[in-house]
Image (spheres, helix red, strand yellow):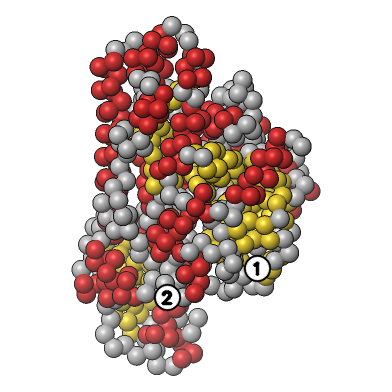
Amino acid sequence: MGRRKKIVQECERLMDEPENIRNIAIAAHVDHGKTTLSDNLLAGAGMISQDTAGEQLAMDTKEDEQERGITIDAANVSMTHEYEDTNHLINLIDTPGHVDFGGDVTRAMRAVDGALVVVDAVEGAMPQTETVLRQALREGVKPTLFINKVDRLISELQEGPQEMQERLLSVIADVNELIRGMAENMDDIPEDWTVSVEDGTVGFGSALYKWDVSMPSMQRTGMDFGDIMELEQNDKRDELHERTPLSDVVLDMVCEHFPNPVDAQPRRVPRIWRGDPESSLADTMRLVDEDGEVVFMVTDISMDPHAGEIATGRVFSGTLEKGQELYVSGTAGKNRIQSVGLFMGSEREEVEHVPAGNIASVTGLRDAIAGSTVSSVEMTPFESIEHISEPVITKSVEAQSMDDLPKLIETLQQVAKEDPTIQIEINEDTGEHLISGQGELHLEVITQRIRDNQGIPVITGEPIVVYRKQPQEASREVEGQSPNRHNKFYLTVEPMAQEIVDAIQLGEVSMDMPELERREALQEAGMDKDTSQNVEDIHRTNILIDDTKGIQHLNETMELVLEGLQEALDDGPLAAEPVQGSLFRLHDAKLHEDTIHRGP
């Protein structure tokens, strides 16, 4: 029996013990060493060779990732680790660090309970470090810290023990300041989530040279920073790796400090699901009940040339098995599961079943997109995954040959399904296919994959920056007429406070919420009480307030007013760019008495 087969069997055995499962993501700024760290963990679990760990970049499974030397897609792997005489199952997601692929990080955080944040000792906390921490804390995911590239402080910067200690402490202080600022409004966190050396939630090491220390590991091995500096300066890195191997220290930290699904789900479910907290479904999710109804949240869609579309995500309740017929939120009918499996980096291993508390990959969910809720009973879906940034760059894509057009359209639809941070639209005036993404690299990678993987020769236009419009001051009252001149509306528009815009973007305010909850959220963001009671519609980050009093037939016409307003906001008045952050007030309306003159 091969080694891999043994690991898969051990993973299958541990799947049914949620107390010994840890679902974690590795997140960091670009080039701080996440994938090199993942290699070490895989080598420690016996899945790749120790000799090539750090250079193999096993979690960068696509050719273009290896060529560019950056992670583009989040990659999943399941492994086992023995801690305090108990074997643990660790489901790990290696996430991208480049800002253009931040959507993958947000989606990965929905599937995990802990985030191992990696920071470069020389560069310190960077902008993307702040972003990944915000993404983790917004999803209720607990952070720990690994300070990487400590060898550079010794060999390149030639720092003494005192300077080194000061630098490392300042990195920890910066990260804690970020965590405190983001966690202060989170009532559902029971304990202090800042990281500290004494608690063992901080590790220091070098992923490239495969060594790591934390306070518990120093106490266990008797090593201190003096020994490390001596071995590092004398080029005895192999001895350093043998005495305090990176994978053991990091995986011990994961097992000890990250919550298991039984601890995490009672806290996380109310944060990401707005269904009835008294229902039996809420109970089975809180209890991680493998015998309950199936509830599966899809966080990633990928294509396999042999198996077709693979949906990866977190099983919150019940057990996934081949042949089950499940509902996919927002679509009619049911989808039948063709196979369930676990990811082992680039390989997918099929298993009999995957119970609650695990991360599973499933084929056969043809209607699912990244963010779908899949369940055995019809239920309130999970909150949609809110991405922090929206598309800012647009390119046109056209097929070189007209014969490839149907295939190109199909591929672009598939791209949008796999990556919700990409927007695809067909410009009706020019017939161009427009693809909008997070940055030039994002679009370059997508178009390269269309060429290489799908074999469609495409021509792309120059990238253009997407603009947004907003009024700069309050307008006078303006009269608007319906095309037949029989109906008149009196409106004003004014810029909206940034706090309210942020609340809408972060999903804290939406039309899907109960009215009372929405009112409170708007007032918290700074809107006055009377205005918050009259919200008629929220479109993008614009709000329409109905300030009219007792106008007959207005409720019949309102839907048409909203349609007209939304169309105008999507294609703003000056330069066909969307409008954002505007507050519209409908003050008065004069409507025709005959229904026929008030119609569409």
Disc 2 is placed on an element classified as loop
Q: From the viewer's perspective, is residue 582 above or below residue 548?
A: above
Disc 1 is placed on an element classified as strand
What residue is rendered at 73% in x and 64% in y? 323
Quadrant for the N terminus, please.
Answer: top right
What residue is rendered at 26% in x and 46% in y? 181
- Displayed quadrant of residue 39: top right
- Displayed quadrant of residue 81: top right
What residue is rendered at 47% in x and 17% in y? 240
**Residue 298 can be seen, yes or no:** no
Please state which amino acid type lies under the numbered disc 1. Answer: Leu
What residue is rendered at 37% in x and 25% in y? 218
Left or right: 516 in relation to 242 = left
Left or right: 370 in relation to 590 = right
- Say which of 194 and 225 sits in front: 225
Residue 493's disc number: none
Q: From the viewer's perspective, is residue 220 above or below residue 407?
A: above
Q: Position of residue 574 (x, y in %)?
A: 40, 55
Characterize the local packing of mark 1: few (<14), some (14-19) or many (20 or more) Cα atoms within 10 angstroms. Answer: many
Q: From the viewer's perspective, is residue 537 above or below residue 110?
A: below
Q: Position of residue 362 (x, y in %)?
A: 67, 55
Q: From the viewer's perspective, is residue 118 above or below residue 419?
A: above
Left or right: 236 in relation to 318 = left
Q: Which residue in the protein does label 1 denote?
A: 326
Q: Which residue in the protein does label 2 denote?
A: 278
Q: Earlier in the sequence, mark 2 or mark 1?
A: 2
Q: How many numbered marks have been drawn onto this rendered protein structure?
A: 2
- Say which of 359 and 536 sits in front: 359
Please state which amino acid type lies under the numbered disc 2. Answer: Glu
**Residue 550 can be seen, yes or no:** yes
